[in-house]
Amino acid sequence: MAKTVERSRTEQVKLWTERAKAAWQHFYRRFKLGSHYTIERFAIIVAALSLSGVLVIGLTVWTAYNAGNAVIGQTALYNSTFVASRTGVKGTVSPVYVNENRDRALVLMKFDTPSQMSSDAADYYVYGTGIDGGPGGGPTKLEKPLAGAIYSFANTGYLGIILEAPDGFASQLINLTVRACKELMTPRNQPGSAGLDSSFAEHDQWRIVVNPAASGAQHLPALDSERIPEPEAVFAYAVTWREEQAKRKVLDGRLAAMKTQLTRISNFTSTMAQTAVRVGDDPSVRLLPPALPSAIDGDSITGMDSAALRSALDRTPADQIEGIGDKTPRARSLDSFSDGYMVNTYVLNSAGPMSGGTDFNWRQRSVAEGYFKTLGTGEPSISAYLAKLSTQPVPSMSARELRWPLSNGQTITDLRPGDTAAKPLIELRNNAMAAYDTYFALKRSYQTVDLLELLVMEQTLDSVAAGSTKASGPSAVSFRS
């Protein structure tokens, strides 16, 4: 019986072997794997590789095309700096701004040294073309018609190009060649025109590549006006806004730091009333608060810190919160920070500003809305007021030089250096001195530097309104259509 089973298995193995051999021979002949089919086999391999190559190249081109379109669709500005070809004057370019309808754009430049370039818009000419391919491509016609104007913002060093697109902007790279028609600097011996046409050697020019239709273009409310906006409105949003918002954050932080020091001073004052030591025959001598200079005497800060305000905004409409409800809409927008920074509502209460400084409610209004007219200084202009303040002596204070009295009629300087019993009073005096000195320095910066800088911004905006120039028409801006 066992021999019969073994013979059956042997026959099955033999049958499977023959079938496998037959299948292999069929595959061998089908795909020409024999030595007689070398040429045919080579052709098949080459064809397969060629097909794979076409697929890989096609996929790469398709991916690159879509990636390129994605970049073009996102990138609004392709060069953030420039150098004038003949004079070598350098400058920077701000992000491209657009209005809400995306049919008006602003390209804003700033010369590193304003005095090196003309401040008259009529002294510039702009020629715009489309770009064939990427940023380094050749000129081509614009896909949609454009018109433009040049703004020079007085003597600030800022130069702006307004682009008007009645049919909206096409998603197309635009090359703006900006020419300075008047050279205020001696041309370089070798103009920087390498890789550019001869006009860059003959004229003081630079290129800016933009795509106003890109998603990266930033909305600028000043461009939303029905008619082309005035230079001061553009400057207030494009330039002053950034500077003012940064300064408001500094002022907000300065008040928070001052509030902390006043809290420390109050705590040390309470501790003085509770700390008594033996001095000579008197078993209960305390340190008394010093008489303070008028610059800080009686100061207090009221309002909510940022955490309390955040909580209040969760429960109460902003218009009903003290310190928020009386702000203008522009002031509220300025105090809304993209990084999540939350302001406080602190207000400094003092008898008056320090010598050489000023004090006003900067939270309620903005630079564009004007502070100076609300101060009642009696001076005819901001410049006259700032000049008056500059003649006043800058205040100074050292808490160590204050008189620190003791309850026994003596002062802390009358204590013997080796009197260990008096050590708590000396340490308390030292801590209080640090808080007074820090508070004084913070208030001096707040009133004699930070607030004055807001007035300087207002003065600059006034000068932009009075001294800006505009140029438009084909003689100022033209395009290849």
Image (cartoon, rainbow, N blue to C red):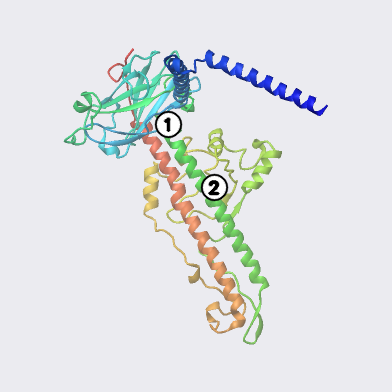
Q: Mark 1–mark 2 contact, CB under 8 Å?
A: no
x and y, in percent, of residue 110 in the image: 34, 35
Does dot 2 land on a helix, a strand or a loop? helix
Judge left or right: residue 332 versus residue 171.
Answer: right
Q: Quadrant of the C terminus?
A: top left
Residue reaching furthest left? 189
x and y, in percent, of residue 183 in the image: 21, 32
Along the viewing direction, whichever of 135 and 269 lies nearer the viewer? 135
Asked whether the viewer can see residue 230, the reply is no
Q: Find residue 252 and name its label.
A: 2
Residue reaching furthest right? 1
Judge left or right: residue 454 versus residue 332.
Answer: left
Does dot 1 land on a helix, a strand or a loop? loop
Q: Does residue 129 sit above or below 396 in this rendering?
A: above
Along the viewing direction, whichever of 248 and 210 lies nearer the viewer? 210
Q: Disc 1 designates what residue?
A: 95
Counting other residues with Cα less than 10 Å from the Cα at mark 2, is it few (<14), some (14-19), or many (20 or more)?
Answer: many
Q: Find residue 462 and name its label.
A: none
- Which three-letter amino acid code belongs to the residue tagged 1? Pro
Q: Quadrant of the N terminus?
A: top right
